[in-house]
Amino acid sequence: MSFLTPEQFAAANKANLETLFGLTNKAFEGVEKLVELNLQVAKAALGESAENAKAVMAVKDAQELLALQASLLQPTAEKAAAYSRHLYDIASSTSAEISKTAEAQFAELQSKFMAAVDTAVKNAPAGTENAVTLVKSAITAANNAYESVHKAAKQAADIAEANFNAVTTTAVKASQAATKTAKRAA
């Protein structure tokens, strides 16, 4: 007994190929966003470096140099935090798109598998009811395990994002406090 006709096999291969190309495009979109972000950061850093070099050349004494350093510290930390946030956003959005596609593929595969199991059950010889029950029970257990893992992964991602936000906020506040302290000392 064959479960797939040649047409079904060809259609499945075509669908898998389309999914592969879709995932590849999503990955390249993420890389494009990353390259664009890095180009923007490099361009901004180059301009800021020129301005900072001019400011350092205009310094007349050590007191003024300390004040200049203090004034540059906070924006640098805030920019680093913003850059990290953009990186995280790009990675998480790309990951979410790929996960969404993978979940859809898994759901479709699961549906097809259950249809095949149902067909096999209907055609099963008499006396195999216990085996059929065992197979269905195993499938249900596997589905429940997948759902549990998926929920745990989502919770872990949410916790990681909350921790990332907390660390970023703490770093910016520490930078602001250090800048204020340096300005008072100068």
Image (cartoon, helix red, strand yellow):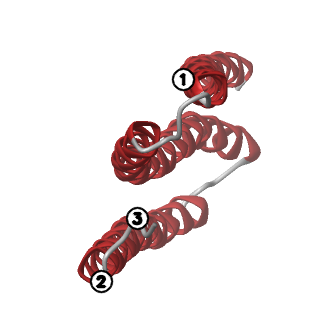
Q: Earlier in the sequence, mark 3 or mark 2?
A: 3
The residue identified by callout 2 is 10
Residue 23 or residue 138, whichever sits in front: 138
Cα–Cα gap, marks 1 and 3: 27 Å
Left or right: 161 with respect to 167? left
Query: Horizontal and vertical percent for residue 185?
Result: 74, 20
From where the camera sits, is residue 162 visible? Answer: yes
Q: Nearer the viewer, residue 82 or 164?
A: 164
Name the secondary structure under disc 1: helix
Instruction: Classify 184 as above or below 157.
Output: above
Q: Residue at x 51, y 44 (%)?
A: 88
Q: Quadrant of residue 51?
A: bottom left
Q: Residue at x 43, y 70 (%)?
A: 2
- Please, what is the three-letter code of the amino acid marked with disc 1? Glu
N-terminal label among 1 and 3: 3
Residue type indicated by callout 3: Phe
Do the CB atoms of the residues marked 2 and 1 lie less than 8 Å apart?
no
Q: Is residue 158 left or right of residue 25?
A: right
Rendered residue at 53%/40% (across/down)? 125
Q: Is 183 on the left-hand or right-hand side of 47?
A: right
Residue on which the image places disc 1: 147
The mark nearer the N terminus, 2 or 1, is 2
Query: Mark 3 — residue?
Result: 3
